[in-house]
Each structure stands twice: as C-alpha cells, then as structure tokens.
Amino acid sequence: MTRILYLEDSYLRETDATITSVKEDKYVTLNQTIFYPKGGGQPYDTGSMTKGQQRYNVIYVGKFSDEVSHEVDRPGLQIGDKIHCSLDWNRRYKLMRTHTASHLFASLLCNGTGALVTGNQLEEDKVRFDFNLEKFDKDTIQHYVDKANEFFKKDIPVKTYELPKEEALKITGIIKMAEAYPPDVPCLRIVEIVGVDRQADGGTHVKNLKEIGQIELLKTENKGKQNRRVYFKLTDQAPLTVSPATV
Ligand SMILES: [Zn+2]
C-alpha cells in the first residue's frame, strides 16, 4: 500500500519515492505519494517525477482499486526505480486555500439557513456549490460571503485528525452532503476549523484561515425547485507564504 503523505502533511511539495508498479508505460504507483488523486470534490494534483536527468510530467492522478495511480506523459519509468516527486505547488496551494474556504462558507450557510450541501466541486480558479435551499436570493449568499471574509482575517488554526466513526457521527454537521454517508471504515478523518466547523474529509487544507486571503461571489443560479448553485473564487490578494518541506 502506498503511504499517503498528503494526508500527513499537506505542505509537502517534494519527496523521494520508489516505483511499485507501471502499467501501459504510463500508469505508475509509488511506495509513498504527495499527489492528491481526483476525488471528494477536489481536483488531482499535477507535477513531475524525475529519474536522474529524465523528467516525467504527472498529468493525471486518480484512485483505482484503492491505489493512487499517477499518469505520466511518456514511457521510461520502471518498477523499482528511485525517483524524485515535485508538485505543481501553485495549483495545489490554491486548491488547499479554496478547499478550506469552501468548508467555512458551507458551515456558515448551512448553520445559518438549515440548507444541506447537495454538490460541491473545486476547480483551480473557482468553486461550485449546490444547496437545497427553498428561499434564496443573492443578498443572502453575499451576506455569508462577507461573513466568511471576516473569518479569513482572523488567526484561526485548521487541524486534521482521526476519530472513531461512531464518535465522529455524533458531531452535528460533520457530514454536510445531503446524501453522503461515511465510507465503511472504522475511523473518519476530521478537518476542524478550530471553534468554527468540523467535517469528515479526505482533502488537503491550509493550516490557518489567514492563508486564504478573501473570496468573492461570482454567480448564483436556480437549479430546479430547491437546488441553488453558487460560484465563488479567491480574490487575487496574496496569502501568507509558507516555508517548503520535504520528506
Ligand atoms: Zn472538503
């Protein structure tokens, strides 16, 4: 099994690894990985693997049969190869900021209106949210965006840890997706915006709300009788920089 480094430390941008399998000259599994595979509403990471002077671009990462599979752009990698992995950090860090921002926003909106999230997709430049909310107008959504932006000015840490599933499910709001129920595992990974929100989640997040910057509302849409769609994005304001880490 691959050791999942992005769950242990989402700030790891580089690591050494050993190739444990190669299929069709382009689908590679590793003994450990920093690459997040597409899933849970968060897009896959991109980056590169280098073997000696040879560079292979990682163009897609997915999870298949419970293994993280990295697709590279050309043949040449072999089982047993020692390689060095690097993330496209600009893309990943933006996704981390957006992901944590979307948890905070959903928490404020759901707690304030009683809505449940019916869909959520992060993209590199924006985030899409679907809610089942009967009464809906742009001012209400803008109100929660403004409220979220107040939180992003505060020094509030974000922690991740595991809880036994039974204990986790007693926490109100831990599952925000209307139809999601937790996978068949004994423990759930919890992402906690300290004092504000806890959600079961397997994605990558920033360590502090201050890193997010600010968000702006792009669009609101009606999608059927109760479904509402909201798009927002990070503003261009630069977040705090963080120091690199390697394993
Ligand atoms: Zn999430």
Image: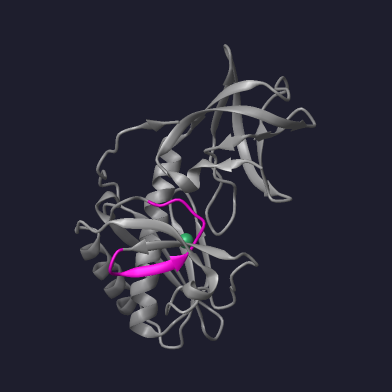
Q: Is residue 197 above or below residue 238?
A: below
In this rendered view, identify the residue nearer to me: 234 or 113: 113
Specify the quadrant that holds the C terminus: top left
Q: Would residue 198 be counted in the magenta stretch?
A: yes
> What color scheme is it?
one colour
Examine the rendering and report whether any part of residue 218 can be seen.
Answer: no
Q: Residue at x 62, y 64 (%)?
A: 185
Q: Residue at x 40, y 52 (%)?
A: 205
Q: Is residue 86 above or below residue 170?
A: above
- Count of marks overlaid on the render: 0
Asked whether, in this view, residue 187 is left or right of residue 99, the answer is right
Q: Is residue 45 above or below residue 168?
A: above
Q: Main secondary structure of the magenta part?
A: loop
Asked whether, in this view, residue 25 is left or right of residue 58, the answer is right
Asked whether, in this view, residue 180 is left or right of residue 207, the answer is right
Image spot of residue 131 (x, y percent): 48, 76
Examine the rendering and report whether any part of residue 190 can be seen.
Answer: yes
Image spot of residue 154 (x, y percent): 19, 59
Q: Is residue 25 above or below residue 193?
A: above
In this rendered view, identify the residue nearer to me: 80 or 109: 80
In this rendered view, identify the residue nearer to me: 57 or 202: 202
Q: Would residue 186 be counted in the magenta stretch?
A: no
Q: Residue at x 59, y 50 (%)?
A: 38
Q: Residue at x 73, y 25 (%)?
A: 79
Q: Which residues are magenta?
A: 194-205
